[in-house]
Every structure is written in structure tokens, then in C-alpha cells.
Image (cartoon, rainbow, N blue to C red):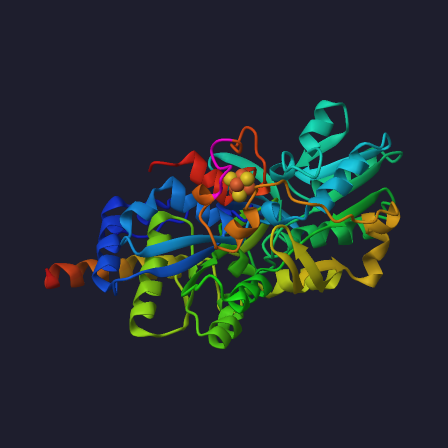
Amino acid sequence: MGERFKPGDLSGFKDSARVRMLSERIYSFYPGGEHKIMEVCGTHTMAIARYGLRGLLPKGLVLLSGPGCPVCVTPASIIDAAIGLAGTKTVSVLTFGDMLSVPGSKSSLEVMRSKGADVRVLYSAYDMLRMADEERNRQFVFISVGFETTTPGTALAVMEVKKRGLENVSFLVANRLVIPAMDALMRLGEVGIEGFLCPGHVSVIIGSDAYRAVSSTHGVPCTVAGFEPVDILLAISDLTEQIKSGRHEVSNCYPRAVRPEGNEAARRTADTVFEECDAEWRGIGTIPLSGLVLRPEYREYDALTRFGIRLLQVEEPPGCRCGDVLKGLILPPECGLFGNRCTPDRPVGPCMVSSEGSCSAYFKYKGI
Amino acid sequence: MCLAIPGKILYKEGDTGKVELGGVTREVGLQLVPESKAGDWVLLHAGFAIQVVDEEEAQATLDLLEEFFKAETEDG
Ligand code: SF4
């Protein structure tokens, strides 16, 4: 108590006395009955499960996991295209680690790699520059996935590829935007979401003001949250208060990272390279203007064009209810395959693969 | 995959900088935080700093929590 904040030390935001106090505070506001809050971001899903936060909340307060895991919502057709490319001798497929074990319609990149395909995991999109420069006779294809948090860095890599004239690099672009998805879920209306716990690091880029339109159009409170237990409970307490008093405002409970206007330099960078397009979300379907493509000035780096790939519609594995999980219609254990045919070691659907997928978070921390 | 973790800028060199996080140093891109300077804490995501941590705001949040505590003890 009364301590000065030191940036490297987040213990003040993990503190158990504060966690308990916030839990009590939420109970004291709780209007009773059932109320549904959706955490849009997969990293929140993970943190909520890991810290056992559900156990600290009133019974009727349901936390639904939303579509906020870029890996889970990447269409199987993109994975299939990447797998096809990985099967070509002169091509190296570059990806963030999370994508490795995501099932396409028949295989995964991990399986391809075990069979000798050149699939490399990058920490940063910039890592590709050195590889492409050193191995000019190979083609490098980067699977570009991610939300607003990740896109600016990828955009910098695209710009640098062009600047350096690296002709052996291209991008399989499946970047997605969070707000159109929130809007689409509200329009569906099936779920009855009464509040959004908004993704902290997407908000770093887009700013808390970016939620105003969704909030006022649908009359839904939107609260930006960080990722420590205290951050999350503080935001849930704000949402509970808003639900109780019938307000629907945008609040920012993560002001140490999120400004109302976001990060303008980052948005400008993303906007230089990418433009919006209608896009498919795995399990959910097509959402208007929810994805990105390369702008005409950068389209020569588009992998689909370069390799003449047509994306093929893919049927989801029978019984997998990822789509319903991502839309917040069911919780993972309500899927008939959960925990028996589908486990993190043998995932059937994408929500069981990524550590931030709802099914995997539920499985890993079940019973807490 | 949207996690970002705080690290401290040791020094800047053009567009990039050396950042210390959890005892290791890493080279990261600082293009997205042009206003950052050595000594700042930044949030790092996939090799790039995406924001400068606002220490005043962090303190304000902790102070707010303290208010909550006080209110509770008074009520209770
Ligand atoms: S448990 Fe497995 S099969 Fe069921 S929805 Fe989740 S990922 Fe799909």
C-alpha cells in the first residue's frame, strides 16, 4: 500500500489483497441474475483461466470468450495454402510459433515440418529480412496473422522488403480487425452480451476512443483492461457497475498503456501498407471490412498472387463447435468433443490449439 | 498472441534500440514509438515497442485502488 510504481515491477497489479478487495467490490455491486460479459481477447481468456478469476465472481456473472485469438480465427483455407507452399522445395514458410500446430483441412505446418518441409518460426517479422538477404535463391513466404497489435510491425517489414528490393519475400495476409468483429457479434444479437472487456494491447494501437461507436450504437459498455489479475478485476468491477446503473460508456482501466487516441504512428504505418477488406473468420463467417489486404503499391508482395493460389472453402471437422465458442454461444465444455476426442495434444479445432484458444485455456486450467 | 511485455530502453540507435527485459537485452524496433528515449519503459510485442508506459497513470491506478480500500474499511 502507498508504494511508488516501478515499471518493471507489476506486483502491485498482482497483489492478492487487492484481488480480494476487488472481488468483494464486484459482489457488492452485483445486481443479481445472469449477466454476460465478453472478453474479446485470447490473452485475457488465458489470464482469467490461469489466475482462476472466474471463481472470484458472482455465480450469475458469465465471462464469455470472444473471437480474439488471431490464430483461432485464421481460415483453414489460409493454413491449407501455407501447407501447400511448404510442400514446395524452393519455398520456406515463415510463421509465428502459435500457428505451427493449427489444423488445416488435412495437415498442419508442424506435420509438414516433421516431414522435412522448410517451416521457420519467427519472433519478429523483421527476422525475415536477414534470411531473405542471405538465401536469395529461396522464396520466403510469411504467414501474416494478427490483430491491430501485430499489424504495424508486419507493415514495417513489408516496407523494408520493398526498400531493400528483396524479390524473394511475399506475404500470405490474414490480418484481422477487432472492432468490426465486436460489431458483428452485437448485430447477431444471439448471445446477449451486456459488456465488453476490451483487449488491452489492441487498444494500445487503436485507442480507447475507438470503442465509442460500438458502445453507443449497441448501448453496450466497453472497458479496456490490462492483463494482470488486478487490471482484469478492476475492469470487470467497472463493467458490473455500468450494467447495474444502466450506463454504457467507454472506460479505460489500463491507462498506463492505453491512451484515448491510441498510437497514431503505429496506425499510420499499418495504413501505409494495408487496406481494409471483407474477411472470413474461421467458424464465424465473413464479416464486412474486418480484414486487411496489401495496398496496390505493395501488392507485388502478395503470396496468393505470386504463387497463383486460389483459396478453397474448407469444411470444419465434424462435431467441432469452435464457431459457437468464438461467438460466445457456448462455453468449451459444452462441445461434445471437448476433453475426449479433442485435447491440446490432439486438437480437433483451432480453439484447442493456440494457448490462447478458449478450449485450450479451459482444458489446461479446468477445475480451478 | 497480442501479449506485450514491458522492457527498459538502454539506448537508442536510429530506428532501433537495446532494451532490457527480465535480465536479458534485446534489439527491438522503435519506429512505432518515435517519441521514446533512453530510460523509458516500453511495451514490447513481436520485436517492436508499441507504446511508452505511462508511469504517472500506473501510479494513479494504484492510488485509485487505495481509495477503494479506504472506502471499504469506512463502510465495513
Ligand atoms: S473442444 Fe475442440 S472440437 Fe470442440 S469446439 Fe473446442 S476446438 Fe472445436
Give me the residue at 72% from left, 63% from top: A277
Tally of numbered discs? 0
Q: Position of residue B33 (x, y in %)?
A: 59, 57
As drawn, is A357 to the left or to the right of B74? right
Give me the residue at 35% from left, 42% from top: A51
Whether the magenta-drawn stretch holds residue A337 is answered as: yes
As drawn, is A339 to the left or to the right of A169? left
Whether residue B19 is visible here, answered yes or no, is: no
Whether the magenta-drawn stretch holds residue B70 is answered as: no
Q: Nearer the viewer, residue A127 or A121?
A: A121
Whether residue A345 is visible here, answered yes or no, is: yes
Q: Position of residue A221 (x, y in %)?
A: 41, 69
Instruction: Please state the extent of the stretch shown in magenta in the rendering.
Output: A335-340
Query: Does residue A277 sit above or below A159 in this rendering?
Result: below
Query: Does residue A149 sit above or below A368 in this rendering?
Result: below
Query: Does residue A300 sit above or below B75 in this rendering?
Result: above
Query: Does residue A108 sit above or below A314 in this rendering?
Result: above
As drawn, is B71 to the left or to the right of A363? left
Outermost residue toward the bottom in this view: A216
Magenta part, dominant SS:
loop
